[in-house]
Image: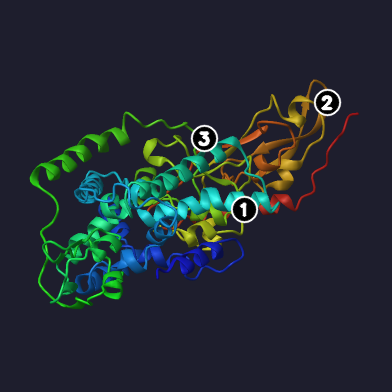
Amino acid sequence: MSLLGFFILAFIQTRYSVPVTFQNLFFRFDPLIFIVVSIAYRTVLSASLLSISIIAATLVFGRFFCGFVCPLGTTIDVFGIFSRKEVGRKTKLKHLKYMILIFLVVGAILGVSFLHFLEPLVIFERSLTLFLHPVVAYVSGLFGLGSARVYTESMIAVLVFALILGLDFISQRFWCRNLCPLGGLLASISKLAPFKIIFGEGCTQCGICEKICPMDAISVDSTLVDTGECIDCLRCINECPQKVFTYKLGRASSPLDLNRRQLIGAIGTSIIVAPLARTLLHRRLLGTLIRPPGSIPEPDFLNTCIHCGKCMKVCPTNGLQPCILESGVNGLWTPRLISRIGGCEKNCNLCGQVCPTSAIRNLTPEEKTFAKIGTAVIDRARCIAWEQDRVCLICDEACPYNAISSLNETIRGTTLLRPFVDERICTGCGLCEARCPIEGRAAIEVFSIGEERKRRGSYITEEKIRLRALEEKEEDIPAGFIIDN
């Protein structure tokens, strides 16, 4: 039985006000994430070093991860109860998962990660985050879906998930057999496993084992079990009438299901697609793409972020939303702060805590307040105070960094307090934009002007400390204002 329940429990616990403990455990044991992200990021992903234990265990016991750990595999098995497994059961596409694995590795070598499109744990987590969680929350009355953009992203995510489940109508565990790159990695390793299920004496070739094997790993005619495809589910041992199967030391059963032409095809496809993902298909909305505080530089961010959606789920203001094409095709499902929905709370650093790959650095609460993600800009043509000559101090009151000051300014003979933004102090948190009272687009918006994104090092500088201290002293001086009715 898989650890699906534990995965769902970890998903439920990934929320605001709950301490981060075991929420990232599955991702840190995932060897495909470790290999691809480490290659694309050009450094060892220390957070996923635990995955080496899975590689070692697979070398000894075979592809047990797919049979006992993977939550997507278990979900496919549950859905398989309703699918027509007997129709088109036999497929000869097992080589595809190795081609996809090579495609991912070569793409990472070329500096582009496509992991988020094909990694099973990421697909499962993202589907829960972007579709199931918002729907449940909406039904229970906690919050709405936010906007049509969020709904579009949710539908894209759930369609991918539904497609994987729907493939079970072609053949049982079609995804796991033929397409899963993690399965391809573990299958290639498990070919070397010394412990395996093997045929014994007395087989009557009744064919029951072939029918019940979910991975089509058994050949009755040749009395062989393909170690690379076997997921150690033990169904053959339990249901064989003659009890001819045993689990013990044995020799390798079959070579890798990949020929030279398929290898060249996988490498060539990656060489063609990787540059396209970075250039021709790149469509960024300049100035409006705001990443969470602590995000590493954009090229590294796209290669390190696995698009799992954990940061969006824990965001207390719901301001972190998935991208569509704001950072190109390869930025699909990456987090973007939409301040109009919700700004970044000053005392919250959960997005960095739950990020399994450190694409968002785990900054301390204090240092997080010094990470500048953008700058607020006032549109005076829409601002109540500037355009309508009415008193409005909401953005000033909303700013937790004292970056917005209300100063007396005379326009058209009317003198009253009007807001000014000190871009040296503003961090781009967007709380001002979220609370702007006008309808539609806010009169104060955050742009990526002056954003700071570092792979390492502190965001705290003496100059920032000095400016904040100076601003706090000025705040202690009461400012008078004149209101002309």
Mark 3 vs 1: CB contact within 8 A: no
Three-letter code, disc 3 = Thr
Which circle's residue, 3 or 1, is located before the other in the chain? 1
Check disc 3: other Cα within 10 Å, few if <14, some if 14-19, many if 20+. some
Separation of marks 2 and 1 at Cα, in angstroms: 51 Å
Circle 2: element type: strand
> Which is more toward the observer, 79 or 251?
79
Q: Position of residue 370 (x, y in %)?
A: 53, 54
Circle 1: element type: helix
Residue 173: quadrant of the picture: bottom left
Q: Position of residue 57 (x, y in %)?
A: 25, 73
Would residue 417 be found to the left or right of residue 194 on screen?
A: right
> Which is more toward the observer, 350 or 312?
312
Mark 2 vs 1: CB contact within 8 A: no
Q: Position of residue 56 (x, y in %)?
A: 23, 72
The answer, for residue 360, to whether it is visible in the render is no
The answer, for residue 325, to whether it is visible in the render is yes
Instruction: State which mark lies toward you, 3 or 1.
Output: 1
- Against 465, residue 271 (above or below) is above
Mark 3 vs 2: CB contact within 8 A: no
Three-letter code, disc 2 = Thr
Q: Position of residue 255 (x, y in %)?
A: 10, 59
Residue designated by label 2 = 414
For the N terminus, give its image quadrant.
bottom left
- Against 482, residue 464 (above or below) is below
Three-letter code, disc 1 = Val
Residue drawn 14% across the image and 76% down it: 202
Would residue 188 be found to the left or right of residue 463 on screen?
A: left
